[in-house]
Image (spheres, helix red, strand yellow):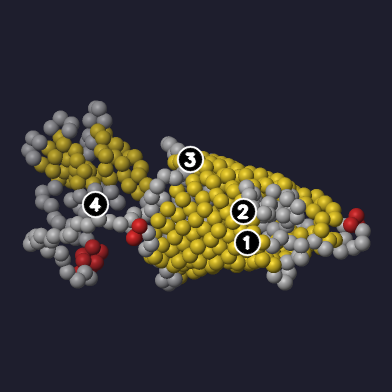
């Protein structure tokens, strides 16, 4: 309201424009007709200009409109705007709902049994999906979630690309109480490698890296408290958890004779924390943030002990050189104290391209520089829609300390370094109009110590996109 003039936003033309009503003679005028839409008009104190929020393809922009000595178009009559697209879509509908006749429907009220409605299988996927972490690996999965969202079940088969083995699994989480309770069972093949002495003199380093497999079945139960400490521009999560697990080992034809067989129990105490800056849709990584994850494993009882293991790993996220570029730095460490020939499996990252090598102590580092290449907006029929292509340059390094074996016995110790360098090319796309974007691509890794180049297929789904 400025004097006897009322400035307002109206949609007389089918889109929001700025108009004026003169209270003296009740005349209407069109002040500004935008291309897409305008709103939030504000007149200057002297009444000579107006600031308007004008919508464009790049978002809202502030523009100034002079109000003095300007010929505004008077509006004598208003014509109803037709919307061709909306009208065409409405014609395709089978009919219009009629709410003029209101009926009364009585529904029987009865007690809802939570225990009888724990499972509701709703979907499957041609990949293995971890419902808690949204981690995607090759395989197949079947998912269930009850109507209250408190009971989650995942059944499936998973292929481990690092170990080149597969296993069947079942996972269940109950979130109806506080804390959360998790249960899991899996069975299948596992694999690892060890340094084998082949010569008569171990000091000549006449060794080979030997791969072996075994059958393993695990049953675990755990509890965790997810504390959401998010505030302002940061997402913060602090989660302590405890997990009990019992494992059963069986030999196959490649398992060393003196490799452990039988069962053992273990307890894991874990503390996880993350603080990540909320990122825009275009960012490949958060511009800043870190993740810290620490665990301690030990065997509390039973006939067989695996000793104990201390593990810690962290991620640091930093902005890249240009906008939407990102840097991710990883550091990890574990130390195992074996009980005889038995110890826990490694829990931190290996350099990409390498398989797992049995070790007693390990330091691991990784560096990634990731950037978007371009946004093609390719539509491949109704099969896929390619939104963005990205690239990542990486360098991984690890220092391992462990034992040499001969005839299943420890005959010496090793201290070695392994590394890998390479590039990843991935694309963000939607398959079959599915809402969650898929990241798919290929990785090429050069292993200097091995002297070879390896290629891996990459695949993941972001269920947090909405």
Disc 4 is placed on an element classified as loop
* Residue at 80 percent of width and 50 percent of height: 415
Q: Where is residue 355 in the image (x, y as percent from the top left)?
A: 69, 60
Label of residue 236 in the image: 3
Q: Quadrant of residue 233?
A: top left
Q: For mark 3, does the 10 Å Cα neighbourhood hold few (<14), some (14 to 19), or many (20 or more) residues? A: some
Q: Quadrant of residue 46?
A: top left
Q: Where is residue 446 in the image (x, y as percent from the top left)?
A: 72, 59
Disc 3 is placed on an element classified as strand
Q: Which of marks 4 and 1 is nearer the N terminus?
A: 4
Seen in the picture, residue 452 relative to 331 is either above or below; the reply is below
Q: Distance between the residues labelled 3 and 1?
A: 37 Å
Q: Earlier in the sequence, mark 2 or mark 3?
A: 3
Which residue was labeled with disc 2? 265
Which residue was labeled with disc 4? 15
* Residue at 58 percent of width and 65 percent of height: 187
Label of residue 248 in the image: 1
Note whether residue 388 is visible: no
* Residue at 17 percent of width and 40 percent of height: 20
Q: Where is residue 377 in the image (x, y as percent from the top left)?
A: 45, 62
Seen in the picture, residue 296 relative to 136 is either above or below; the reply is above
Taking depth in this image into account, of 63 and 136 the one nearest to the observer is 136
Q: Earlier in the sequence, mark 3 or mark 1?
A: 3
Q: How far apart are marks 2 and 1 (CA)?
A: 9 Å
Disc 1 is placed on an element classified as strand
Q: Nearer the viewer, mark 2 or mark 3?
A: 2
Q: Where is residue 437 in the image (x, y as percent from the top left)?
A: 46, 60
């Amino acid at each position: 309201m400025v004097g006897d003039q009322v400035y307002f936003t109206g949609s007389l033309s089918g889109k929001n424009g700025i108009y004026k009503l003169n209270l003296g003679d009740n005349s209407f005028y069109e002040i500004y007709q935008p291309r897409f839409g305008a709103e939030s008009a504000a007149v200057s104190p002297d009444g000579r200009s107006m600031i308007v929020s004008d919508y464009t393809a790049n978002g809202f922009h502030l523009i100034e409109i002079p109000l003095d000595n300007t010929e505004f178009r008077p509006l004598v009559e208003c014509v109803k705007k037709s919307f061709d697209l909306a009208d065409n879509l409405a014609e395709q509908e089978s009919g219009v709902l009629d709410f003029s006749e209101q009926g009364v429907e009585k529904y029987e009220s009865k007690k809802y049994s939570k225990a009888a409605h724990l499972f509701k299988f709703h979907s499957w996927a041609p990949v293995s999906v971890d419902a808690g972490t949204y981690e995607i690996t090759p395989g197949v999965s079947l998912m269930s979630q009850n109507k209250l969202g408190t009971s989650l079940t995942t059944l499936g088969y998973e292929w481990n690309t690092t170990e080149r083995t597969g296993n069947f699994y079942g996972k269940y989480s109950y979130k109806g109480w506080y804390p959360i309770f998790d249960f899991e069972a899996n069975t299948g093949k596992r694999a690892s490698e060890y340094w084998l002495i082949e010569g008569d003199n171990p000091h000549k380093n006449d060794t080979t890296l030997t791969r072996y497999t075994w059958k393993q079945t695990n049953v675990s139960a755990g509890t965790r408290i997810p504390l959401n400490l998010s505030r302002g521009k940061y997402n913060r999560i602090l989660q302590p958890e405890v997990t009990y697990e019992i494992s059963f080992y069986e030999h196959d034809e490649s398992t060393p004779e003196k490799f452990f067989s039988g069962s053992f129990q273990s307890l894991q105490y874990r503390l996880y924390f993350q603080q990540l800056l909320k990122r825009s849709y275009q960012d490949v990584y958060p511009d800043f943030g870190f993740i810290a994850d620490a665990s301690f494993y030990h065997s509390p009882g039973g006939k067989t002990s695996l000793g104990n293991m201390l593990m810690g790993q962290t991620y640091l996220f930093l902005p890249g050189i240009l906008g939407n570029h990102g840097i991710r730095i990883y550091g990890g460490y574990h130390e195992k104290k074996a009980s005889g020939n038995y110890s826990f499996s490694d829990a931190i990252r290996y350099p990409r391209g390498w398989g797992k090598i049995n070790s007693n102590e390990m330091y691991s580092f990784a560096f990634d520089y990731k950037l978007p290449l371009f946004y093609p907006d390719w539509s491949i029929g109704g099969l896929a829609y390619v939104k963005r292509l990205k690239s990542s340059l990486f360098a991984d390094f690890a220092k391992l300390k462990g034992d040499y074996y001969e005839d299943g016995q420890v005959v010496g110790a090793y201290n070695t370094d392994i590394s890998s360098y390479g590039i990843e090319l991935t694309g963000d796309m939607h398959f079959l109009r599915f809402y969650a974007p898929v990241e798919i691509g290929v990785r090429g890794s050069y292993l200097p110590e091995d002297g070879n180049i390896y290629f891996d297929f990459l695949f993941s789904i972001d269920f947090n996109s909405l």
